[in-house]
Image (cartoon, rainbow, N blue to C red):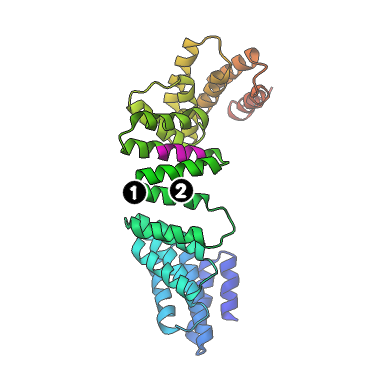
Amino acid sequence: MRVQSGDHALFNGDIPLALAHYRTAYQDSSDPLVRAAAKWGEARTLYADARYPETLAALQTLITEYPNSVQLAEAYFLQGLTYNQIKNYLQAASAWQVYLILRPGVLDSYAEELRGDALSAAGDYAAALAAYTAAIQAPRLDDTIYVDVKVAQTQASLGNYTAALALYDGIAARATNDYLKAQVAYLSGSAYQALGQTAEAQGKFRLAVENYPRSIYSYLSLVELINAGAEVSDLDRGLVDYFAGLNGMDSYGAAISAFDRYIAANPTNGGTAHYYRALTLREQGKYEEAVKELSTFIKNYSNHDKWTQAWQDKSDLQWIDLNLYE
């Protein structure tokens, strides 16, 4: 009952109560099944509370004292997660390898992917490549396309840039997600850059910037283009910088500058620069300026696909941020 009470408390997020129940169950019982279950519950609770050294200690007790427990395989899996949290990547990979031996055919693809991530973080790219390949070959519910990206990145880390580029091309042909397309374009550009093929690299970076402005990888591509002195449309620069700001980058000022340059050079334009300039001003906390810019957009670009949204944006600014209720 104590173990069940601990499970209930853990489910409810009551860490102190869960630990109290599990530890009491472990101390009061002589039944190895109960003690193993209690120690397993304690380890899970400590992990949930981010107390990783204590988690490892509890798991080691379970593994050492109860090697025949039904929780043994799961204990090694959690041990891998815990080592990964404290950046002991080789130990994490080793723990997941033991899990795969103890519990084959259940989570093989996902465990191998985790091993690949850990080995890659440890700099053992050859072993990571083998793990990712095993992950792709094992059954899994979702598509392997994101593991394919990791395989390609690992090939690049090994210096096999031509192989990586071939993989990136295949992934790009299959991708339906703009964020993934942007990532692959950036990674392809980086691979071409490593090969010294500047024109091809800039072509890939430009592909990301011009087509997928919402992705952080498009921002990274923009940085590469600017650092290389390549010409980039100020409208594209503004859009990429705006969305990068939403992703935590300090780029709103650069976005405003780009939009201003674009509008000055193109006084007759489609309106996109005005709309996103307004949104950028809003994110900067310049609410009155944002309202003014939205008013300009609403007045002059009634055929724009953001025209209806602009009315909502303007009313939100006036009501929520400027407290203009009438």
Q: Nearer the viewer, residue 220 or 16?
A: 220
Q: Amino acid at mark 2?
A: Val
Q: Which residues are magenta?
A: 181-188
Find disc 1 in the rendering and name its residue.
Answer: 157
Q: Is residue 5 above or below residue 275?
A: below
In the rendered image, the quadrant that contains the N terminus is bottom right
Q: Main secondary structure of the magenta part?
A: helix
Q: Examine the image and state in which quarter residue 227 appears.
A: top left
Horizontal and vertical percent for residue 294?
60, 19
Q: Nearer the viewer, residue 267 or 134?
A: 134
Horizontal and vertical percent for residue 162?
37, 43
Q: Is residue 234 above or below residue 251?
A: above
Which structural element holds mark 1?
helix
233 sits to left or right of 190:
right
Which structural element holds mark 2?
helix
In the rendered image, the quadrant that contains the C terminus is top right
Q: Would you say the residues marked 1 and 2 are in contact, meaning their CB atoms lie under 8 Å apart?
A: no
Whichever of labels 1 and 2 marks the residue nearer the N terminus, that label is 2
The question of residue 186 being in magenta is answered with: yes
Q: Examine the image and state in which quarter residue 129 appears.
A: bottom left
Horizontal and vertical percent for residue 146?
50, 50
Q: How many marks?
A: 2
Q: Residues within 10 Å of mark 1 (few under 14, many from 20)?
A: some
Residue 51 seen: no
Q: Is residue 82 above or below residue 246?
A: below
Residue 39 seen: yes
Find disc 2 in the rendering and name its residue.
Answer: 149
